[in-house]
Image (cartoon, rainbow, N blue to C red):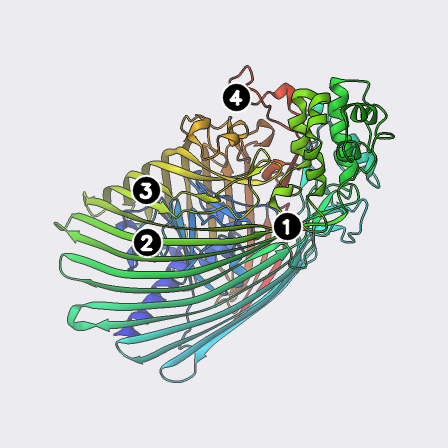
Amino acid sequence: MRLTTLLRTTASAAVVGAVTFGFAGIASAQETTVDDIIVTAQKREQNLQDVPIVVTTLSQETLQDAGVSDIKDLQILTPGMTVTSTSSETSTTARIRGVGTVGDNPGLESSVGVVIDGVYRSRNSVGFGDLGELQRIEVLKGPQGTLFGKNTSAGVINIITEQPSFTPGYNADITVGNYGARSLSGSVTGPLSDTLAMRLYAGVSERDGFYEVDTGDGPRTQTDDANKDFWTVRGQLLWLPSDTASFRFIADYSSRDEYCCVGVQTRVGPTYPFVDLLSTGTGQTPPATGFGPVPFSRLAYANRGTGQRIEDRGVSLEANFDMPSMNATLTSLTSWRKWTGDQGQDIDYTGADIAYRFDDGEYGYGVENLTQEFRLAGSTDRLDWLVGFFATQEDITRADAWNYGADYTPFLSLLLSASLNRANPLIPVSPSIIPCFTATAQTALGLQSCLGTGGAVGNTGGIGFTVGAGYADTYEQESTSIALFTNNTFRVTDQFDITLGLRYTMDEKSVDGQQMNVNGNGTTCARALANAGAIGTVLGAGASTILGNFCLPWSNAAFNNRTVSESFDDSELSGTIKASYRLNDSVMAYVSYARGYKSFGYNLDRVQSGITPTASLLFPSEVVDSYEAGVKMTLLNRTLLLNATYFDQTFEDFQLNTFLGTAFVVESIPELTSRGVDADFLWFSPIEGLTFSGGVTYTESQYGDFVAADLANPANFPQLSLLPGATASFAPEWSGSASLNFDRSLGGGLRGGFALSAKYMSDYNTGSDLLPTKQQDAFTMVNGRISIGTEDERWMLDIWAQNLTDEEYIQVAYNAPLQGSAFQSTVQPNGTFYNPALDTQTIDAFLGAPRTYGMTLRIRY
C-alpha cells in the first residue's frame, strides 16, 4: 500500500509538472485538466479546486521557465506577494497581502512561514538552488494557524522536493550568463536494493556583483558587490521496509562566501559636503537640485568590506505508518537544523571612514532548531480527521559590534558645528569641536571660547571617539514551543463540507545578553554628561540634542557591562472554521474564518529612550482574525480554472521592525487591516502545448489610528507619526502576475517552446516609517525563456533572461545613519512630526537585480 501510494503520487506530480505548467513530455495539453493539480495545503492530497484556501501552486517546470532560483524570484509568479532583502541576503522578508516582518532582527519570527519537506524554517532566507529538484511550491495566503509547524500570521510557502526514485536517473545543468555567471549542478537517483532508494544532489554557482563600488578611503579592495559564490550538497534515502511503512531521510549542507550588500543613495541631503571633505574622492553621490531624488545608479560607495559567510545544514527523518484497521496513517517528522552567518558592513555606505563592522564573526547570528511532529490522519465515509503534536526547541545567538573609523569624530564635529552655526553664525563649521564638550571640568566661558574658535582653544583634556572597536555585544535567546492541533473535514452532504481546525500553542522564551563597551568607548559620552551644566548654560534647550549625539546607542556609557536577562511565556488558541458548498461539478463556493498567531520575542539590539537604555527588550505576540469568502470554478470541459476570494484581515499588536537611523526598534502597532480580493486563472488552451496562467490581487492594507500613548515606548512615536491611518509599507494596491507557456514537437526528434512571465505592482512605500522619499513607482518585471531539445528531453538548451526590460527599482529604502534627519521634535502643521521642507535626511536603498541573461544546458537520463 505504501509503495503503491508513493508511485501514484510521483506519477501525478509528473503529469502536473510536465504538462500543466511546463514541457509536455508525458501527455498533450488536451489530455490534461484542472483535476490533475494536486496540493497538500491541508496535509493530505487534494485537488486544488476542492481546497477552501487561496493556494498558488507552482511546479518545478514553472519555476524553471520563470527563472526562479530563490525566494525573491518567487514573487514574479505570485500576485499579492513581495520579497525583499536588505543588508544581507539572510535579511530576507516575504510579505503576503501587504503583511510581513522585516528580517534584519533575528528576534522576530516570520509572518510568512517557510516549510521545506514538512520542516519549518524559522527565517525566510531560502535559495531554491540549494534544494535540488523541486516537485512543486505551494503559496498559501492568509494566516495558517493549524497545520504548518509554528503559527504564521500572513501565510506559508510550502516547498516539496523530489524524493528518491526506484527508477535510475541522472541529470546535470550547466549555466553561463552575464555578470560572469556560471553554475553546475547535478543529481543521481535510483535503487540501492529492492526496498531502498537514494537521491544525491550537488551544485556550485558563482557570479560577479551587480554593483560597482567606489572604495573611497579604503582599505576595501573589492570594486563590485552582491556577487554569488556558493556550493551545496543534499542527500536522501527512501526506505520501504513493508507495504505499510516508509522512511525518508534527508541531509543537506550549503556554504556561501560572498560579499553583500551595499546601499546606494537615492536622495542626498545637506551632509554631503562633510562626506566629500573627509573622503578620497566625492565619497557619495552628489545631491540633486533642492535635495530631490538623484538619478538611479548602481554605483555604491563603501570603504569597508561587506563579506558574508553563511552555513546552513540539517537533517530530517519522516516516517509514515499505514494503519489499515483505522484507515489512517501515523506520521513522525523529526528535524535538526543549524544556520550560521556573519558579515562585514560599511555602516554609513560612503567613501569616508566613519563606522563599520568586520566579517570575522563579530557581527552575525546563528539559529539552531530541533523539531518533532506527530500526525495521525484518517478518513471515514463522511469525515477526514487529523490530530497532531508539534514541539520545537530553538536557540538563537547574536553577536553585534561597532567600530569607529578615523573620520567618525571629525564627521560628528562637522554635523554638530553646522547645526550650531545655523543658530549662531559666530560658531564656525569645524571638524574639531568635539573636545570642546569633553574638556576636563569645562566651564560655560571655556565652552563659548572653544566653540567660537572652532575647537582651537578651550579644549584642555578634551577627547574624541577612540578609533577602532567601540562595542561588542552578545545575545542568546532560547525558545520552546509546544502545540496540540487537529484539523477535520466533515462531509455534511455530497455537496456541503465543514472544516474545523484548532491549535493550542504554548511558547516560552528567555534572553540573556551582555552589552560591552570596549576600548574606552563610552568615555566620550560620560565626559559630555559631566559637562552638562556648562553645555546647558551655553546652548539652552539645544543641549539635550548635543548630549544625545554624544550618547547614541553605540557610544552610550550606560551600556557598559550591562547585562540583559528576561523570560516570558504565553499561550494562544488559534485555528479555522470553513464551510464549502459545491453548487455543481464545476463551481464551489466557500467562507472561512481563521485566527493566526505569531509569537512574542525580544529585540536583540541596543535600545534606548532618550539616552536611557530600555528596561525590557520584550515585544508582545501578534494575532490576526481573517475572514474570507471565495468561489472556485472549473470550466470549458475542466480545462479552465477561475478562482476569486475576498479577504478581510485584522492584525492586533502588529510587530513592526523599523530602522530609525540609529537603531532597529520593534514596536507593536495596535492595529493593521488588510482587505481585498485575490483572483487567479489557469487555461489549457485548445492549441497544442499552449497554456496561460496568472492572477491579480487588490489590497487595502492600512494602519489603524493610534497615538504615542498606545505604543510600548511613546518616545518612538515621532518617527512613526506618518503611520496612523496610512497605507502600510510594501503593500501595493494592485499586484498582478501572468505567464504564457508554449511547447510542442518540431519534428525530426526535436521539440521546442518558449515561456514568458510578468509581474506588475502599483506604487508602494518601501520604508517602515513611510517617508515619502522612500516611495517606489509602479513597475513591471518580465522574465523569458526559449527552449529547444530532443523529443524525450534527454537534452534541452534554454536561452533565458531575467528582468528582460532592465526595470530599475528599489527593494528597500532606509535612513542613512548620521546623515540628516526627517522627523522633527515638535508637531508640525500637518499634525505629524514630519515636515518635507525641513527634511534633511539622506536616503539609501538596496536595489533590485538588473537584467541578467544566459544559457542553460539540461541533460537528463
Check disc 2 and give the amino acid type.
Answer: Met
The percent coordinates of residue 58 (x first, y second) are: 42, 53
Q: Is residue 67 above or below residue 194?
A: above
State the mark number for residue 337.
none
Depth order, front residue of 28/292: 292
The percent coordinates of residue 394 (x first, y second) are: 44, 59
The quarter of the image holding the N terminus is bottom left
Q: Is residue 115 left or right of residue 457?
A: left
If you read the primary sequence from the N terminus, does the residue marked by circle 4 or circle 2 appear first? 2
Depth order, front residue of 666/475: 475
Which numbered mark, 3 or 2, is in the foreground of this view? 2
Residue 427 is drawn in which quadrant? top right
State the mark number for residue 832.
4
Label 3 sits on residue: 643
Real-space Cα distance between discs 4 and 3?
Answer: 42 Å
Residue 325 is drawn in which quadrant? bottom left
Label 1 sits on residue: 852
Determine crowd level at label 4: few under 14, some 14-19, many 20+ residues with C-alpha closer than 10 A. some
The percent coordinates of residue 396 (x first, y second) are: 50, 57
| Label 1 residue SS | strand
